[in-house]
Image (spheres, helix red, strand yellow):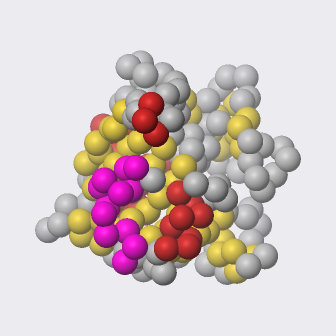
Amino acid sequence: MLCIERFCPTWRSAAIHESSPIGRGASLKLMKHAPGYLATQYFPGVKTGSIHHSVRCENLERLTFADASFDLHLTQDVMEHVFDPAAVFREIARTLRPGGMHIFTVPLVMKDLPTELCARRRPDGTIEHLRRPEYHGNPLSNDGALVTRNWGYDICEFILRESGLFTTMVHLDDLAHGIRAEYIDVLVSRKPRA
């Protein structure tokens, strides 16, 4: 929430989309205090844009929203699980209003080494594992969420190349707010105003 307050101080009146909210912290505060907040989840096999168990289904690789729909996109530890991050960043850029931003977290496991591809989707839809499969917790599935990439600092170049969004990396280390850990970077991608 610190970065949302800092980079988007008008969040209370903003049109906000959060993919895969975590049900605590910033997600709950936004839900309570921002009337323009919309939370979505991806449910495989469910038509995107439809409501499933009271939640809108959206696939970040192919969003059903119109161009320039949002001032702010939020994702918390999602981008290491998508198969086509280039498509995701293009969709985020497409659906952001001029001057809008994507504020997100992703574990930057590789640090200053190149991003490592861990798994990819074959043309037939099956998954090819390029290293031993790793799964993170997933509130929607006991099977967990497959890690498809171990991102490095080169993520900023990747986002710019694929979507035209310029990304700032914010390293949070703030004991006054109880923040000190290994993966505490927040990335802020911005769409130009003109």
Question: Residue 190 lies in magenta, yes or no?
Answer: no
Vertical relation: 4 (above or below) 77: below
Where is the C terminus found, in terms of image quarters?
Answer: bottom left
Report the front residue among 103 and 46: 103
Residue 43 percent location from the top left of the image:
73, 64
**Region of the chain picked out in magenta, as a range:** 2-13
Seen at 41% across and 30% down, the residue is 173
In this orientation, does residue 167 appear?
A: yes
Q: Nearer the viewer, residue 47 or 100?
A: 100
Q: Residue 148 or 71: which is nearer the viewer?
A: 71
* Residue 184 drawn at (x, y percent): 47, 34
Q: List the single residue furthest toward the left.
A: 194
Residue at x-position 41% and y-position 42%: 186
What percent of the width, then of the height, locates residue 12?
40, 73
* Residue under the image location 65 percent in, 36 percent down: 147
Q: Give the image location of residue 120, x and y in percent.
A: 62, 39
Considering every residue shown, the one lying at the far top of the view is: 113
- Vertical comparison of 22 with 47: above or below: above
Would you place residue 73 above or below residue 177 in this image? below
Mark count? 0
Q: Which residue does the image show at 56% across and 71% down from the upper left?
A: 31
